[in-house]
Image: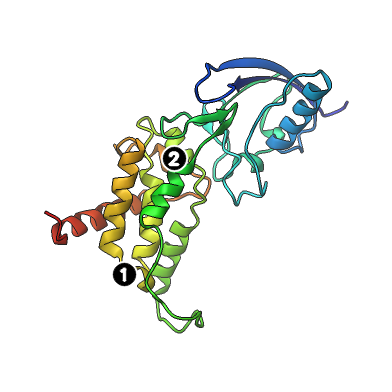
Amino acid sequence: MSGHMNLTLKVWRQKDAKSTGKLENYEAKDISPDMSFLEMIDVVNESLIKKGVEPIAFDHDCREGICGACSMYINGEAHGPKRAITTCQLHMRSFHDGETITIEPWRANAFPVIKDLVVDRSAFDRIIQAGGYVSVNTGVTIDANSIPIEKEIADDAMDAAACIGCGACVAACKNASATLFLSAKVSQLALLPQGQAERQIRVEAMIDQMEEEGFGNCTNTEACSAVCPKEIGQHHIARMNREFFGAKLSSPKK
C-alpha cells in the first residue's frame, strides 16, 4: 500500500505487578502515517486477537490530549519523540518505514505495573486528596470578573492548572520525582484567592504524602519540564519550595 509503513514493535508485556515482564516483538503492517500512535496499537491488537494472542493492554480515554491516561515510554522518551503532546496526539508520520519502536510503561516504584503498559497512578490521587483542593466555603459561583486578579497571576495559575497528571515528569526523572506534578497543583491554588485559607497546611500535607508514596527527590535536572505535554515550567517548583519553606517557618508543629 502506497505511503504505508511496516514497523517492528518491541512491547513490554507483563501479567501483573508481581510477574516478571519482558519485551516481545510484534509486526505492525500497512500502517498509515496519518494514524495516531494509539490507533496503530489498535490495529496491532486486532491482528493479535485474530491469531489468538492476548492483546497489548494500554491505558486510554479521551484520545484528545486531555486526560493523560495514554502515557507510554516510546523509544526511551515519555510520550515519544515530539514535544508538548501526549501519546494519543503522536502520529505515525513521526516514524519511518522499517523502523523498530520500543514501547514501555512508566518506570517508577510509585507507579506499579498493572498489566503490560498500564501502571497504577493512584499515588497521584492520594497526593491530591492530601491537600490539592479548597475545602473552605467560597460561596456560590460568581462572575469571573468579580474578584480582581492580575492577568499575569491568572495566566500563571492557568498554566499550572493545565497539568493533566499523566506522570511523564516522574517517568523522565532519574529520581522518579513527582515534584513537577505536585508543584503545579500547589502553585495553582497558591496563586488564587480561594486557595489562601489552607495555603500552609496544603503544601506540607501534599509533600508529606508525596514522600510517603515513595517518589524520589528533585535534583533540578529539568527533564520533567522537557517532556511535560503541557509544558509546565520549572518556576512552579521554585514557587512550591517557597511555599513549603514559608509554611515550615510559621508552622505550629513541634
Q: Quadrant of the C terminus?
A: bottom left
- Helix, strand or loop at label 2? It is helix
Side of 132 where 164 appears, left or right = right
- Helix, strand or loop at label 1? It is loop
For label 1, the residue is 196
Residue 43 on image: x %, y %: 78, 30
Between discs 1 and 2, the one toward the N terminus: 2
Q: How is the image coloured?
A: rainbow
Residue at position x 65%, y 39% in the image: 90
- As drawn, 47 above or below 124: above
For label 2, the residue is 169
Counting other residues with Cα less than 10 Å from the Cα at mark 1, is it few (<14), some (14-19), or many (20 or more)? Answer: some
Side of 49 where 69 appears, left or right = left
Residue at position x 43%, y 57% in the image: 160
- Specify the amino acid type for callout 1: Gln
Residue 34 on image: x %, y %: 77, 38
Task: Between residue 127 and residue 64, name the one nearer to us.
Answer: 127
Please, which residue is most extreme toward the right here?
1
- Any mark on residue 84, and which? none
Q: Quadrant of the N terminus?
A: top right
Residue 208 on image: x %, y %: 28, 47
- Specify the amino acid type for callout 2: Cys
Residue at position x 79%, y 32% in the image: 32
Side of 117 where 46 appears, left or right = right
Would residue 184 be seen by someone viewing this image from the given angle? no
Would residue 88 be seen by someone viewing this image from the given angle? yes
Task: Between residue 253 and residue 61, name the one nearer to us.
Answer: 253
